[in-house]
Image (spheres, coloured by chain):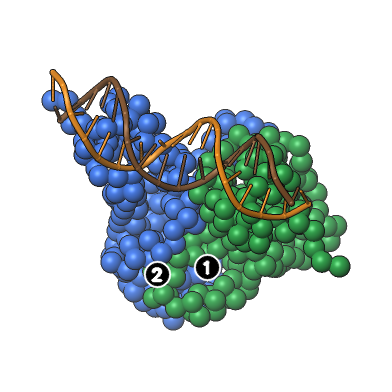
Chain colours: A blue, B green, C orange, D brown
DNA sequence: GTCTATATTGTGATAGAC
DNA sequence: GTCTATCACAATATAGAC
């Protein structure tokens, strides 16, 4: 069984919107990518905005859902740290365009993100209590869990967001060198976080 | 002496392009912001693209120039780490819109960034030799300087890029709480990096 | 140099045949 | 459901008066 027209459109829209963002994307390009014509886009989804909204919310939801799961697992503290970094980077490897796409939209329309986020919630409570507990036991330095999460995500996401800059500045344009660098990130970030938590 | 029309336009263009990006920005909006009319924009700068190019390269150049200085100073290793984080965050506090703007453009037109970057170069060599030296003396863990720089920048930049998300997810929409969080970042990031470098 | 008015083009959206 | 042809409008760009 072959994929439905609606499915073709959504897949094409994901690609094009992710590359260009809402404003720069062209309905014609989406139609071409899907192998149909513009009129059908409007037949299935009323307008460009509607189509975008749908695609963006779906993508963002999947992304947020992924992190949620990783932070919420009921496993020992250090395993969770490692699992989060591994899992988060795995998602990024599979969707390297995604952070740039989300940032672009955050920048264009912050209000939308806020309203979207308010409907869901990231359960950081469990993680938080684990940290205070480990710190109380003297197993780790006392740290603010929010900062810890932001640190992990920032280190994971940045090389994907800034790919062309890193490529030019650090790797002299070599895709190969950039790729090797990315491969090292999992271990590097885990080491950085864990070493920073150890007590001297 | 009051500012020239050309200066007014450039300032207005910076604001509007930074908020909206190239495609979503409107010449009318720039004209309004500058207190003149559309025709003058084309009189001074031939086209929207030309104006954008000019503004973007200027902004990016200033940004890159700032980091360059911070990494290149001939001061002791730990002072440089701290100075870089402090200095980089200072730049971000003064231009909080900037990371989002740059990311947006990276995503829209990666090739431009590459060609721009190739004309300049970030001197990481001095920093690199400092690290290998400190590691050889047993003062710090052996680390890859490129990863270290990426870690620092990622942790600095992320909360600015993801402001609306953090705001919604971590601070329940409170601007005040977000602001306090940012204020803590300098110390947090410095501690994270320095602790991670210590040998246990 | 600065303006108003207008030309031109690109693109989202619709009408209507099949 | 899918297409071709067309509309309607918004936005860049230019002409030309002052």
Q: Is residue B25 left or right of residue A122?
A: right
Would residue A103 be visible to someone looking at this image? yes
Tell me the subunit letter for badge 2.
B
Picture residue at 32% right of the left edge, 68% below the top: A118
Residue at image location 54% in from the left, 51% down from the top: B25
**Quarter of image, res A112:** bottom left
Residue B27 on image: x %, y %: 58, 50
Tell me: B150 left or right of A108.
right
> Crowding at label 1, few (<14), some or many (≥20) Cα neighbours within 10 Å?
many
Q: Mark 1 lies on which chain?
A: A
Task: Name the image quarter holding the N terminus of chain B.
Answer: bottom right
For mark 1, what is the residue? A197
Q: Disc 2 marks which residue?
A: B168
A111 left or right of B154 in image: left
Q: What element carries label 2?
A: helix
Q: Name the spot of residue C11 as percent of width and height, x first.
A: 42, 37
Question: Is residue A156 at least partly visible in the picture?
Answer: no
């Amino acid at each position: 069984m072959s994929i439905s027209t609606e499915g073709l459109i959504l897949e094409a829209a994901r690609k094009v919107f992710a590359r260009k963002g809402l404003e720069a994307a062209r309905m014609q390009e989406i139609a071409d990518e899907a192998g149909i014509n513009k009129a059908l886009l409007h037949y299935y989804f009323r307008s460009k905005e509607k189509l975008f909204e749908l695609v963006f919310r779906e993508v963002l939801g999947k992304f947020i859902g992924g992190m949620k799961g990783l932070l919420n697992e009921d496993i020992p503290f250090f395993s969770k740290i490692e699992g989060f970094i591994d899992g988060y980077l795995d998602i990024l490897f599979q969707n390297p365009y995604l952070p740039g796409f989300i940032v672009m939209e955050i920048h264009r329309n912050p209000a939308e993100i806020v309203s979207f986020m308010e409907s869901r919630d990231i359960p950081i409570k469990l993680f938080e209590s684990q940290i205070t507990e480990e710190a109380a036991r003297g197993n780790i330095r006392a740290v603010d869990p929010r900062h810890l999460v932001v640190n992990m995500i920032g280190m994971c996401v940045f090389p994907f967001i800034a790919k062309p800059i890193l490529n030019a500045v650090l790797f002299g344009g070599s895709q190969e060198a950039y790729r090797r660098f990315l491969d090292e990130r999992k271990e590097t970030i885990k080491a950085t976080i864990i070493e920073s938590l150890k007590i001297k």
